[in-house]
Image (cartoon, helix red, strand yellow):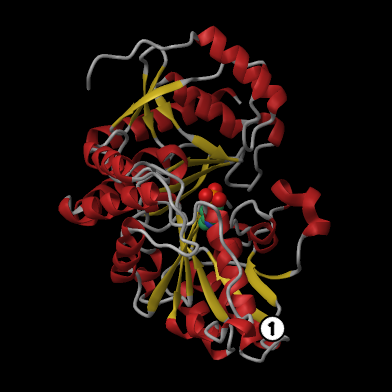
Amino acid sequence: MGEKATPRHSRAELTSWDHRHLWHPFTQMRQWLVEEPLVIARGEGCYLVDLEGRRYLDGVSSLWCNVHGHNRPELNTAVVRQLEEIAHSTLLGLTNMPAVVLAKKLIEIAPPGLTRVFYSDSGATAVEVGLKMAFQYWQLKGKPGKTKFASLVEAYHGDTLGAVSVGYSELFHRFYRPLLFECFRLPPPHLYRFHQGLSDKDAMAKAVVEAQNVLSRHRDDIAALVIEPLVQGAAGIWTQPLGYVRALREIAEENDILFIGDEVATGFGRTGRMFACEHDLISPDILCLAKGLSGGYLPLAATLTTEEIFSAFLAEYDEFKTFFHGHTYTGNPLACAAALANLELFETERVLERLEPKIVFLRERLGADLAPLAHVADVRQWGFMVGIELMRDPERRIPYHPTDEIGIRVTQEARARGVIIRPLGNVIVLVPPLSISRDELDLLIEATRASIQAVTERA
Ligand SMILES: *Cc1c(COP(=O)(O)O)cnc(C)c1O
C-alpha cells in the first residue's frame, strides 16, 4: 500500500458532523450520539483501517458481503477500467456490456434451470422482484387465487415492505404490522431442535410434516414459498440440516407453489459451495442474490428465474403483461464490472477449493475453543457463517436479559482486541471474508473466545 493519505477532515470534525447529521441503520441513535465513532478510512485485505491507522480484522465481511478482501487490485482495476468507459447508463430501452456479460456468467454458474437475470440494487429489492414476479406469474397463468406467500418463522428478507411481510420479526418490524400482507409461517428445524430439545432427526421430521400440512392445505392460495436455504442468517445463524431444503422444494413443487431461494447471504461461497441450494442439489424457481455478488464492492442485486416464469410474461404490447418493475440503477455497469471481476477471482484463485480446509479448521477451533465455554449454549456453522449463542445458564436454558447487552459487550471487547464482529441479540456472529488466512482466522477465534470469556465471567 502507498503512503497513508492525510485525512482531509479531523476526527473531531467528522464526529461532530456525524453526530449532527447522520442517522445510522439499525442503530439506537441515543446510544450512538454519546459514543466516539470508529471512523474507517481504508481497507486492506481482511483488515479495516481507521483514521489513526489502527487496524481491525473485518470479522463480518462488512455486513456479510466482502468476499476477496478489501482493496483487491483485481477488483479495483475492473472498476477503474469501467469507470473510464462509462459509470452508468440505463437498462430501460438500452443495454450495456458488463450487464450482458454478467447475466450470461450468472446463468452459467447458477443452479440448472435458471435462465433469466433481473437486476436491482439490494437484497431487499432482489426479494421484492421475486415476490412480484411470482405473484404476477399466477395471475398470468389464470390462477388469480394464488395471492399469498409462505416463509419461515423469523425469516429475514430485507427491510422494504414486501420483504418485511415475508420476513417478519417481532423485534424489528412490529410498528409496520398494519402495512404488511399476511404470510404463512413454517417453523424451521432449528426451533424444534434448540427450543424444544428434539434430536436433529426428529426436529427435521417435525418441520417437514408441518410444512407439508400448511402448504398442501393452502395450495390454492399460495403463490410462492420463500426461504433462506441452509442458513437463516439474521434470525441468529439458524442452520438447517441437509435434506430440509430439498424436502421443502419437493413439497412446493407437488403443490404447485413456486420456490424462491433467498441466497442474498448464502450465495457466492458463504456456505462452502457457490450457492447453498447446491448442497441439496435443488434449483429454485426464483433465486435472489445480492451481498457477495459484487465482491462486497458496490450495491448490486439480481433475481434469477426460469424460462417457464419468464415466458408467462410474453405477449403483445397492448396486453400489458409486462413486468412493470425497475430501478434507476438497474444493471449499473460499474457494479456489474465489479461483479464480473468477483466471479473471475473465484475461478483464478480457486476460492471454493481453498475454502474447504479453512471451513474444517474453523469447525475444529469452534469445537475446541468456543463450545466448551460455560455460557456458550450452541455453536452453529455452515461454511463461513457462524453463530455462537450465549446464555446465562445453558443447562437450564435461561437466556441473558436484553439489559445485559451481552452481545454488544462482547463485540466491544473484541474491538479492543482489534477485531470487528457484530451480535444478533445474544448470538455472536462470525462471517469472515472467504480470503481470510489461517492466521487471521486464528486471531478471529482467539479474540472472540477471550471476549466472550471476559464478558460472561463479569456478567
Ligand atoms: C441481508 C439480507 C437481505 C437484505 O439485503 P439488503 O442488501 O440489506 O437489502 C435479504 N435477505 C437475506 C437473506 C439477507 O441476509
Q: Which image quadrant: the N terminus?
A: top left
Residue 214 location (% of width, % of height):
68, 81
For image coordinates 22% across by 50% down, the residue present is 345
Query: Which residue corresponds to the image point at 48% horizontal and 11% vertical from the top-left?
Result: 9
Q: Toward the viewer: 173 or 445?
A: 173
Q: Quadrant of residue 243?
A: bottom left
Please name the residue shown 24% across and 39% down the image.
Answer: 77
Q: How crowded is mark 1: few (under 14 residues within 10 Å), some or many (20 or more)?
A: many
Residue 117 lies, in percent from the top left, at: 42, 68
Picture quadrant where residue 44 is located: top left
User: Does residue 385 appear left or right of residue 176 in this picture?
Assistant: left
Residue 13 lies, in percent from the top left, at 56, 9
Residue 114 in the image, given as x and y percentages of width and height = 39, 76
**Residue at position x 42%, y 15% from top?**
51
Q: Is residue 335 visible?
A: yes
Residue 445 drawn above or below residue 123? above
Total marks shown come to 1
Q: Is residue 88 left or right of residue 355?
A: right
**Element under label 1?**
loop
Is residue 210 something that shows in the picture?
Answer: no
Q: Name the residue under label 1.
A: 146
Quarter of the figure that contains the C terminus? top right
| Amino acid residing under circle 1 | Lys
263 relative position to 392: left or right: left
Mark 1: is the Cβ under 8 angstroms from ligand 1? no
